[in-house]
Amino acid sequence: MQFSDGIFIFLLYTCFTSCLYSIRHQKLNVMKAPVILIVDDDHEDRELLEEAIHEIDSSIKCRTATDGREALALLQNMDDAPDMIFLDLNMPKINGKQCLNEIKKTERFNTVPVIIYTTSKLSEDIAETRNMGASCFITKPNTYRELRTSIVSLISNLKSPKNREPEFAVLTSTLFH
């Protein structure tokens, strides 16, 4: 069977547009890279945490914010919710507790694990953030090795199936000695 040039081009165009439509409208089973939001007003702490995360799993994409207000604005502009949030407590503008409260009130983000990552060791901060819905409380470690050790299991859980809600954990630098 032979086609004229016009019919061949029409069939080729039809096939091409059909394929494009399929690609655009079908859900592809592609594993997307996990995204972690790091919220901390201390530039060095943000950098160290991001470096430790990438050392554990280089496929993770990190987004950063310098305070709670910036974090909430960033979350509202993200297409998909992050897979995890590391949140400092002592920040200007909107502090960590206020930010945590807003995150947990927002349906789109209320199931995202929030890891409190702070210099505080106060039992009141631990209890309050747990009651507010935080998944874990980490007192900022003294060394990079301790930092890496404290987050390795959290990061490795990002790619495992979400079977159940993790139990609340408290990690302080005294646990590493």
Image (cartoon, grey):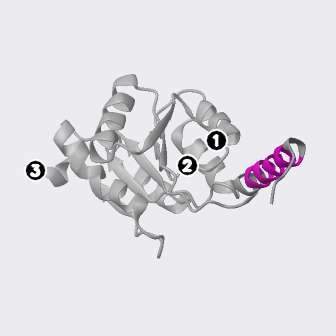
Residue type beneath disc 1? Leu
Task: Out of 77 and 30, give the one closest to the viewer.
Answer: 30
- Residue shown at 43%/48% (left/top)? 116
**Crowding at label 2, few (<14), some or many (≥20) Cα neighbours within 10 Å?**
some
Mark 3 or 1: in front is 1
Q: Which residue is mark 1?
A: 75
Tell me which segment is drawn in magenta: 7-20
**Crowding at label 1, few (<14), some or many (≥20) Cα neighbours within 10 Å?**
some
Q: How many marks?
A: 3
With respect to residue 93, does 37 lie above or below?
Answer: below
- For this orientation, the residue located farthest to the left is 177
Q: Position of residue 158 (x, y in %)?
A: 42, 58
Lower position in the chain sequence, tag 1 or tag 2 = 1
Task: Out of 13 and 41, give the one closest to the viewer.
Answer: 13
Q: Which residue is mark 2?
A: 82
Residue type beneath disc 2? Pro
* SS class, disc 3: loop
Looking at the image, can residue 41 be seen? yes
- Residue shown at 45%/70% (left/top)? 161
Task: Out of 33 and 94, give the one closest to the viewer.
Answer: 33
Pointers 1 and 2 in contact (CB under 8 A)? Answer: yes
Q: Which residue is mark 3?
A: 177
